[in-house]
Image (cartoon, rainbow, N blue to C red):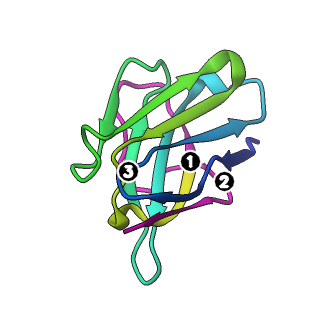
Amino acid sequence: QVQLVESGGGLVQTGGSLRLSCAASGRTFRRYAMGWFRQAPGKEREFVAGINWSGGSADYADSVKGRFTISRDDAKNTVFLQMNSLKPEDTAAYYCAAEDRMTRGIRRDPGPYDYWGQGTQVTVSS
């Protein structure tokens, strides 16, 4: 069992930055692929970024590529999402997710992820 707790959300102006953190419980964090997803009111949950179990590969949605960076610190059981040049359309609840999968690939479909956090709200004002 893995528990995920996100933090770092908040209110920021357009062009600002935020760093989200997702702390995971459990001793097997390093075997999990990690993903960040977001969901705005009235919209479906969408993939934002993912990183594989080893940290050797990462993937980003086109809408955030070049602005967001995902990373992981296995010693701290934590995955991060550095968000720069934020836009109003980035406003959403952000969720981290974990999938027990030790491959190079990263899934963009939320279905296969095994564990989810409760989410942290990011609001970007114009």
Write down the residue under mark 3. 48
Q: Residue at x 59, y 49 (%)?
A: 114
The quarter holding residue 77 reads top right
The picture places residue 12, in percent across and down from the top left corner, at 50, 57
Read off the magenta span: 97-126
Viewed as shown, does residue 68 lie left or right of 73?
Answer: left
Among the two numbered marks 1 and 3 on one chain, the one whose residue lies closer to the N terminus: 3
Labels 2 & 1 near each other (Cβ < 8 A): yes
Among the two numbered marks 2 and 1 on one chain, the one whose residue lies closer to the N terminus: 1
Q: Secondary structure at mark 2?
A: loop
Please check the rendered image and state whether residue 34 is part of the magenta-colored stretch, yes or no: no
Q: Is residue 53 visible?
A: yes
Q: Residue at x 33, y 59 (%)?
A: 87
Q: What type is the residue that disc 2 sits on?
A: Gly
What is the quadrant of the C terminus in the image? bottom left
Location of residue 45 with respect to 96 vertically, above or below: below
Write down the residue under mark 2. 117
Give the CA distance from mark 1 to mark 3. 11 Å
Nearer-the-camera pick, 72 or 17? 17
Please check the rendered image and state whether residue 107 is part of the magenta-colored stretch, yes or no: yes
Write down the residue under mark 1. 97
The quarter holding residue 88 reads bottom left
Q: Secondary structure at mark 3?
A: strand
Location of residue 42 with respect to 5 vertically, above or below: below
Mark 2 residue crowding within 10 angstroms, few (<14) / some (14–19) / many (20+): many
Seen as rendered, the residue at the extreme left is: 62
Among the two numbered marks 2 and 3 on one chain, the one whose residue lies closer to the N terminus: 3
Give the CA distance from mark 2 to mark 3. 15 Å
Mark 1 residue crowding within 10 angstroms, few (<14) / some (14–19) / many (20+): many
Mark 3 residue crowding within 10 angstroms, few (<14) / some (14–19) / many (20+): many
Q: What type is the residue that disc 3 sits on?
A: Val
